[in-house]
Image (spheres, helix red, strand yellow):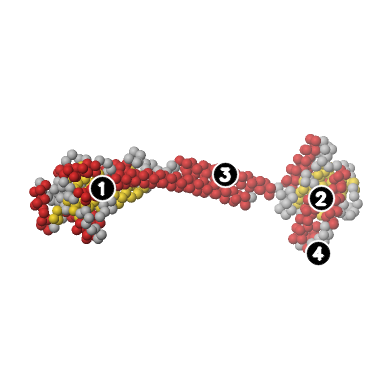
Amino acid sequence: MRRRFWAGIVAVMVIAVGSVAAAVLVYLDDHDDFHLMQREEAVRAAHQAEAAAAVSIGKLSTASAFAQTQGRLDRHGFSVIGRTLVGEGALDGAAYIPRIPAASRDYYERALGIPIRERRLGPIMRPAAQRPVYFPVTFGASTHPQPEQVRGFDLGSDPLRARVLRRAGESGRAVATPLVPLLIGGTGVNVFRAIYRDGAPRTTRAERWRALTGFIAGSFRVGDVAAAALTALPEDVEVQLRVDGGLAFGPRRDLEGAATVPIHIADRTWVLAVKNPGGPNLSLPVALAVLGISLAALRGLLILAWSRGERMRELERQASEDALTGLDNRRRFEKDLAAAMARSRRYGSTGALLVLDLDDFKRVNDSHGHPAGDRLIKDVAAVLRKRTRQSDALARLGGDEFAVILPRCSREEAERAAEAIAAEVVARAPEDGGERVSVSVGVAMFGDDPRTSPATIVSEADAAMYAAKDEGGNRVRVFEPDSVREGAGER
C-alpha cells in the first residue's frame, strides 16, 4: 500500500509539474511568435523607410552626375533637377552648394547677387578670414514655401557640417550628418553628394578633394523618415527612431520588449524600435496550468481518500487476523461461523465446524523452545490451507487450537476432510530435528436444526475434540447429541 501511495503522489507531482511545464512551453511559443511577428513588422517598416531614403539618395547621385557634366550649375540648370529631388522619396529639401575659393568670394557674390553669410549653429564658428574656401547654399528647393531664406549661407561656417563636407568630398560617396537643426526648419540630417570636375583624376582622397567643385545636398526630416516607416505598420503600434544613441522620434520612455532594426541612410545608421500593444496571449497557458493543477489536486484527494480507505481496511484486517499464521483470529471466526450458519438456514444445506488441537504441544515448547513451537504452528496453518477449499474459513483460536468452517458439507465429507488434515499433520517432516506431532479433531455439524446457535456449535466441536484427546489423541471425533461417536481410528 505504501508503495502505491507514493507512486500516486509522484503521479500527482508529475501531472502538476507537467501541466505547468506545458503552460510555460505554450507561453514561450506564443512569446516567440509574438516577437517574431513584431520583428517582421519592424523589418518591413525599416525597409520601407530605407527604400524611401534610397530613392532620394539615388536622385542626389543622379543630380551630382548631371551637375558634373554641366560644370557649375546656374539657376536654370538647378531648376531642371531641383524639384524632382523633393518630388518623391523622403527628402524635404535640396540645394546646390558650389565650392568657392576665398579669392573668388567677391566675384561670386557680385555675379550671382548672393551674399555669402554665416550663421552660428553651434558653439564654434571659424572667422571667414581663416577659411580658404566657402560652401554657400546657392539654389534650393523645398516642400516648404520659403527656401530662399537659406540662400548664401556658408555651410563651412558650421564646424560639424564642415567635417561632413570634407568627408563627402574625399570619399566620393553620399555622406550624412548626425541629427542636426535643418536650415529649412525642424530636425533631421543633411546628406551631401560631391560634384567633381568632369574628367579630373579621382583615384585618391587628395585627388578627389582637388577635383571637388561643389555638392548636391538633401535634407531628411526625422518626421518624414518616421512617416515612411509608419506606412508599413498598424495604427496602434509605438515607434521610436534613434540616431547616434539619441531619441529623434517617438515617446520619451523605454519601449520594453520592442523589436529594433537598423535603417541605413547614406553612411549613417538609424535605429527603428517597434512595440506592438499587449503581448503574448496568456489565456491558453493559464488555462493549461489551472487545468493541470486542478487534475493533480483532484487526483491527490482521491489518493488520500483511497489511502485512508486502505489504511482502515488494513487496520480491520489486522484486527481480524492472527499475526503469527495469517489465519483469521477468534473474532473473525465467530463472524464467519455465524454467516455460514445463516447461509445454511437460507439454502437448506448443512455445514461442519472442525476444531483442532495439537497433541503434546507443551512438550515441543519445553524441549525445543518457543521458536520451534511457533514454526510448528505455522506448519499446521500451511497444512490447513493445503487441505481445504478456497470457500472454507480457517482460523487460529489461540495457542495450538485451530478451527475450520466447511460450508455446504455433508457429515461424510467433513469426516474425510478432518482425517486428511490429521494425516497430513502427522506426515509433515519436522525441521531442525524437531519432533513429529499429531492432532485431535472434533467435528460438529450445523444446518439440520435452525435453532442452533454458533456458540452451541463451537461447544459441540470442542466436546468432540476433547473426547478425541481423552481417547489418546491423533483421532477425529464427530459430535453426537447423546454421545461422541468414533469416526476414525488411530493413525
Which residue, given by chain and number where applicable, does mark 4 sit on?
A: 433
Which residue, given by chain and number where applicable, does mark 2 sit on?
A: 387
Which label sits on residue 62? 1
- Residue at image coords 35%, 49%: 260
Q: Position of residue 488 (x, y in %)?
A: 90, 50
Q: Earlier in the sequence, mark 2 or mark 3?
A: 3
* Depicted 454 relative to depicted 194: above or below: above
Q: Position of residue 308 (x, y in %)?
A: 61, 46
Q: Amino acid at mark 2?
A: Arg
Q: Is residue 317 left or right of residue 57?
A: right
Q: Nearer the viewer, mark 2 or mark 3?
A: 3
Q: Amino acid at mark 1?
A: Thr
- Residue at image coords 11%, 54%: 104
C-alpha gap between disc 1 and disc 2: 114 Å
Please tell me which residue lies in front, 37 or 255.
37
The quadrant of the image that shows the C terminus is bottom right
C-alpha gap between disc 2 and disc 3: 44 Å
Q: Secondary structure at mark 4?
A: loop
Q: Nearer the viewer, mark 1 or mark 2?
A: 1
Please tell me which residue lies in front, 356 or 10.
10
Q: Position of residue 41 (x, y in %)?
A: 37, 44
Q: Nearer the viewer, mark 2 or mark 4?
A: 2
Which label sits on residue 299? 3
Q: Are marks 1 and 2 in contact (CB under 8 Å)?
A: no
Residue 82, quarter of the rendered image: top left
- Residue at image coords 80%, 62%: 434
Please tell me which residue lies in front, 268 or 152.
152
Label 3 crowd bin: few (<14), some (14–19), many (20+), radius 10 Å: some
Label 1 crowd bin: few (<14), some (14–19), many (20+), radius 10 Å: some
Q: Secondary structure at mark 1?
A: helix
Q: Earlier in the sequence, mark 3 or mark 1?
A: 1
